[in-house]
Every structure is written in C-alpha cells, then in structure tokens.
C-alpha cells in the first residue's frame, strides 16, 4: 500500500507574513518613491549640465526649474506621511489574535 503524503502545514509565522504581504508591498513602494524624490536636486543638476548648458535651451531650463520646485515643495508632505503608511497599511481590520509565540523556558 502507498502511504498518503500530507502536505506540510503552514507555520503561524508564514501565515502572518502572508497576510501582511500587501502591507509590505505598499510600504516598499512608498519608500522607493520617497528615495527617488530625495534625488531631485542631484537629478536636476544632472539634467541642467547634460541638456540645458550644451543646447542653451531656456524653455528646457524653465521646465526643469518648475518641475524641481514642485517636487522639492512636496517632499516634506511625503516624508512626513512616510511614518503613517505602515500603520495604515498594517491595519487589516480583522479581530484576529496575534501570533502566539512559545513560552521561553526559565532557567
């Protein structure tokens, strides 16, 4: 007779991490966008030296200045809300109990 193989059971940790997958993706995406936003000054200077100075294009310079000003003015809003995203995305709205960890044996 063949023995019936049962699939391994999901651990509680794997189940908890799986249920928080959307939160991890949201926080990672938000963090990546903020990190790119922090490069606004460096990217602005790169574009000025690469595109504007060789071509002496004033409309390109004006467009880059307006875009950089908008991004730099919005940076405080995005960085201040960075701490609120994990709390918001981590709230699932369920009344599930937290993971039960095994008790540590006392010596």
Image (spheres, grey):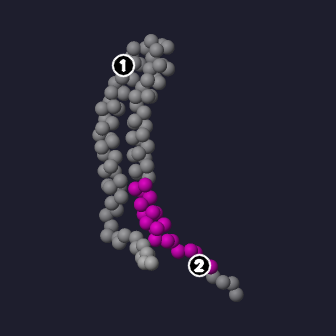
In the picture, the disc for residue 78 is none
Q: Earlier in the sequence, mark 2 or mark 1?
A: 2
Say which residue appears at 40% left-offset and 73% top-offset.
100
Q: Nearer the viewer, residue 41 or 66?
A: 41
Say which residue appears at 31% left-offset and 64% top-offset.
93
* 38 is higher (above) or lower (below) than 58: below
Q: Nearer the viewer, residue 102 or 11?
A: 102
Residue furthest right in the image: 1
Q: Which residues are magenta?
A: 5-24
Q: Position of residue 39 (x, y in %)?
A: 42, 33
Q: Is residue 6 magenta?
A: yes
Q: Quadrant of the C terminus?
A: bottom left
Label 2: element kind:
loop
For disc 2, the marked residue is 6
In the picture, the disc for residue 62 is 1
Say which residue appears at 39% left-offset and 46% top-offset.
30
**Total marks in image:** 2
């Amino acid at each position: 007779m063949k023995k019936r193989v049962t699939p391994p059971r999901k651990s509680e940790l794997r189940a908890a991490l799986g249920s928080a997958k959307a939160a991890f993706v949201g926080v990672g995406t938000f963090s990546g966008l903020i990190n790119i936003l922090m490069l606004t000054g460096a990217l602005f200077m790169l574009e000025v030296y690469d595109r504007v100075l060789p071509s002496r294009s004033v409309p390109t310079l004006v467009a880059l200045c307006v875009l950089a000003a908008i991004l730099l003015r919005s940076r405080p809003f995005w960085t201040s809300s960075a701490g609120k995203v994990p709390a918001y995305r981590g709230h699932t709205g369920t009344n599930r109990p937290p993971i039960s960890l095994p008790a540590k044996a006392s010596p």
